[in-house]
Amino acid sequence: MYATPPDRPTATPAATATATPAATATATLAALAAAQFAVTLSTSIVNVALPAVRDGVGLSDAGMSWVVNAYGLAFGALLLLGGRAADLLGRRRVLTAGLALFAVVAVAAGLASAPWMLVTARTAQGVGAAAVAPAALSLVMRLHPPGPARARALGVWGVVSGAGGAAGVLLGGILTEGPGWPWVFHASGIGAAVVLAATLRLVPADPKEDPGPRPRLDVVGSLTVTSGLVACVYGLTAAGRSGWTDPLVLGSFGAAAVLLALFVRVERRHPAPLLPSRLLTRGAVGPANLVMALLGAVWVGLFFFLPLYQQQVLGVGPLEAGLSQLPLAAANMIGSGLAPVLARRLGPHRTLLAGLAVQAAGFLWLARIPADGTFLVHLLGPVLLVGAGLGAAFVQLTGSAVSGVEPADAGLAGGLVNTTRQIGGAVGLAVLGTLAAARTAAASPDLPHTAALTEGYRGAFLLSAAVLGVGAALTPLLARRARPVRESVPAPPPASAALRPTSRTR
């Protein structure tokens, strides 16, 4: 069933009529899921193309990570502002504006001829993604009431979110070896334009809002947290080259501390803060987002290091490296699709714990890769485990992170869960990259360069397994925090209960 929930009684007749037919409901969900697919795909589509992008634009080895992190940081740090803008200005309106910006600057990234041009375009692309992701998720939550319908919608959301990361690596390989690396970005822009057209046609118009003053957007808070995170990630990245005691590294960390402290001060005084304290204390929202940050760290690291290992150590081409991601994508989709079924039988938090444990086992296996490995023997098994566990864990965490919030905070909650994943990914990639570089540099000079690189990648995968272990240890806290939410809402069941549907999923 696809209906306008009772908390938005001012929906226009056209919007209500559009939301009634089941076929239109499916098409609308497909359009919203495609928007999420586009922003997730753009996180990983550049990974296979990074060696070609480095040669084409003149990037340094350290600069390669900024092609990923410029997008991820802008995306993650501005998601809260995007979520709040969706709540205040209209979710469909913010979604379409974000898609338009995303499409234009993606094409511009493919036309870049210098590193600063590419990094700037990727940053602007992240700004567009920060508007798209929370608006799309909050529309899904608004248009699918709690119960089996929302559980199915979240299952679809999990599938496309996970598949977007794996499909990005595959498509990046095809385009890099075919028409060339600029089409990695051009394809993202064209895809976003198609999704924009589908959104304008299928997604119901924003309901009429009551007249009256609206809270101000917290622009200062957004700028301080973004600048602070950029300074932190820059310090972590530079530490791998210059050492932890380098003045520039220490200055970056000092600036990050000041800016993030200023962000906390701004949030306490702003009448409509980006991150109100009530949101983090509501149900399992706080611990779910903490675990999501850890999940994002290993997620982004996997799609960064795995293609580099295949190309720089095993010597495969971009297309072969991309095609080898198909099993990962398939496992991820299967894990996401089975998550609601497993949650019904095992409970959502046991399902989350199982997903994290399966992923950790896969990363421990990857930590044993040799310099002369093969895909079938050394990569296929672990990527299947990581993909399946990632899909199941992502669906459960998304449901927990948006459950129990007030309708007016739906966009903010959707922005927060994506914020923690993206920021976790950016910080995680900086930490993992620094560790990998340090282990490679510390390898015996008698080792071949490929063996030294392998030592670094193995260290990154081993740390990823440890990070997932921390996430698993936090799962009991998430379960305890979720209980009061279930008990406080007698009917209808909250979003967390939607992950344990009592009716059979068709």
Image (cartoon, rainbow, N blue to C red):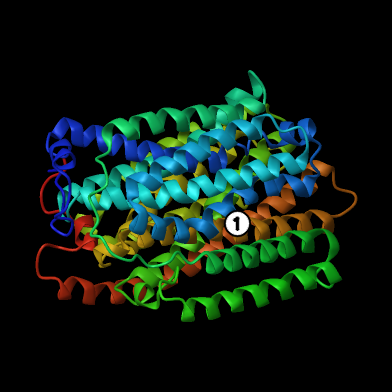
Where is the C terminus found, in terms of image quarters?
top left
**On the rendered structure, is 220 left or right of 474?**
right
Query: Residue 185: percent from the left, percent from the top?
Result: 60, 31
Amino acid type shown at disc 1: Ala
Instruction: Evaluate whether residue 33 shows in this view.
Output: yes
Q: Is residue 67 above or below residue 444?
A: above
Instruction: Evaluate whether residue 368 shows in this view.
Output: no
Quarter occupied by residue 460 = bottom right
**On the rendered structure, is 165 left or right of 488?**
right
Camera-side residue of 499 and 130? 130
Q: Residues within 10 Å of mark 1 (few under 14, many from 20)?
A: many
Q: Is residue 493 above or below residue 142?
A: below
Camera-side residue of 327 and 271? 271
Query: Residue 379: percent from the left, percent from the top?
Result: 56, 40
Q: Secondary structure at mark 1?
A: helix
Where is the N terminus found, in terms of image quarters?
top left
User: Mark 1 = which residue?
Assistant: 426
Query: Residue 123: percent from the left, percent from the top?
Result: 62, 47
**On the rendered structure, is 482 left or right of 428?**
left
Camera-side residue of 87 and 449? 87
Q: Residue at x 14, y 55 (%)?
A: 9
Camera-side residue of 82 and 485? 82
Quarter occupied by residue 332 = top left
Query: Residue 377: percent from the left, percent from the top?
Result: 57, 37
